[in-house]
C-alpha cells in the first residue's frame, strides 16, 4: 500500500525529436524494452492512471497498454514540457502528477515516495524534481495541482523555460545517485548508439 496521495503518471512525449530525425522516442528500445513499456512496468504499481502527452501514435500506445490515456498540448507549436505539464491538469483526476520524460534511461527505486517526502518537507512547495548524479532533471518531477496557476502565468508571458518556474513553484530537489550511468536521457541518434555500446561493455 502506497503511503502517499493518489498520483497519476504523465509521460512527456510531445516534442518533435529533431535530433532523432523525428522518430518517436517513446516507441524506441534503448535497453531491452520499449521505452513506453519500461516506464510503465517500473511504475505501474505506484501510480493511478497512466497518461501520455503526445501529438502522434495515440492508437499505437493504446494497443501496447490498452488502458493508457493520451492528451495533446492545449496549444500547437511544440512549446516544450511546460505546455505539456500545464495541459495535463485539464485531464488528470489526481491532485498529484509524476511527470517523466519519454527519453529517460534510468528510473530510481522509490522515486515517487522520495519525491513526495521531499515535497512534504516544504509546505509551500508545489514541485519536487529529480537530481541524478548531480544533474538536475527538471521534467522528471512531482507536481501538485495548484502548480497549474504558475505554469499558466509563465506561458501567458511566453516564458517557456521550466527552469525559470522553479522559484515561483518553490521547487525542492530529491537527490539520487546511480553508479556508471553515462546518459540520464537520450537526445540524439548518436547518443543512443553510444548508450547501447556502453551498456554492452558494462
Image (cartoon, rainbow, N blue to C red):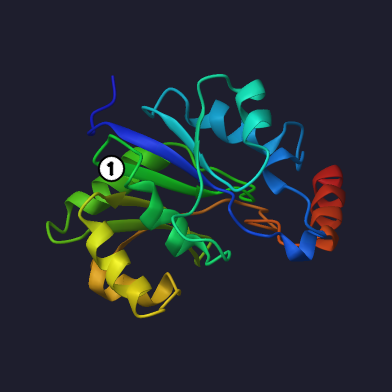
Which of 175/5 is in front? 5
Which of 191/55 is in front? 55
Instruction: State whether residue 63 is above or below residue 13.
Output: above
Find residue 119 and report its horizontal and vertical position in percent.
24, 52
- Report the quarter where the C terminus lies: top right
**Identity of the residue furthest to the left in this view:** 123
* Disc 1 crowd, CA 10 A, few/some/many (<14, 14-19, 20+): many
Image quadrant in which you'd find residue 19: bottom right
- Report the quarter where the N terminus lies: top left
Which of 137/163 is in front? 163
- The residue that appears at 40% across and 28% down in the rendered structure is 49
- The residue that appears at 77% across and 32% down in the rendered structure is 32
Instruction: State whether residue 193 is above or below residue 60.
Output: below
Find residue 64 and report its horizontal and vertical position in percent.
66, 23
Apparent side of residue 154 relative to residue 194 in the rendered image (left or right): left
How many numbered discs, if any?
1
Find residue 129 and report its horizontal and vertical position in percent.
38, 57
Find residue 60 and report its horizontal and vertical position in percent.
68, 30
Image quadrant in which you'd find residue 187: bottom right
Is residue 140 visible to us here? no
- The residue that appears at 40% across and 78% down in the rendered structure is 159
- The residue that appears at 43% across and 63% down in the rendered structure is 82
Secondary structure type for disc 1: strand
Instruction: State whether residue 129 is above or below residue 199.
Output: below
- To which residue does mark 1 refer? 96
Which of 167/19 is in front? 19
Is residue 179 visible to us here? yes
Instruction: State whether residue 66 is above or below residue 165.
Output: above
Amino acid at each position: 500500500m502506497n503511503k502517499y496521495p493518489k498520483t497519476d503518471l504523465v509521460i512527456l512525449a510531445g516534442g518533435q525529436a529533431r535530433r532523432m530525425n523525428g522518430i518517436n522516442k517513446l516507441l524506441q528500445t534503448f535497453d531491452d524494452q520499449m521505452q513506453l513499456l519500461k516506464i510503465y512496468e517500473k511504475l505501474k504499481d505506484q501510480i493511478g492512471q497512466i497518461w501520455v502527452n503526445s501529438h502522434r501514435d495515440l492508437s499505437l500506445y493504446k494497443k501496447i497498454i490498452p488502458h493508457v490515456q493520451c492528451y495533446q498540448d492545449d496549444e500547437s507549436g511544440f512549446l516544450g514540457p511546460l505546455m505539456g505539464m500545464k495541459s495535463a491538469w485539464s485531464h488528470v483526476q489526481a491532485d498529484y502528477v509524476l511527470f517523466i520524460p519519454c527519453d529517460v534511461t534510468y528510473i530510481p527505486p522509490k522515486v515517487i515516495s522520495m519525491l513526495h517526502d521531499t515535497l512534504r518537507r516544504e509546505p509551500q512547495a508545489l514541485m519536487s524534481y529529480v537530481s541524478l548524479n548531480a544533474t538536475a532533471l527538471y521534467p522528471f518531477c512531482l507536481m501538485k495541482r495548484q502548480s497549474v496557476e504558475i505554469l499558466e502565468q509563465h506561458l501567458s508571458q511566453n516564458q517557456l523555460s521550466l527552469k525559470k518556474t522553479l522559484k515561483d513553484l518553490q521547487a525542492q530537489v530529491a537527490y539520487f545517485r546511480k553508479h556508471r550511468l553515462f546518459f540520464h536521457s537520450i537526445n540524439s541518434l548518436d547518443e543512443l548508439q553510444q548508450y547501447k555500446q556502453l551498456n554492452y561493455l558494462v
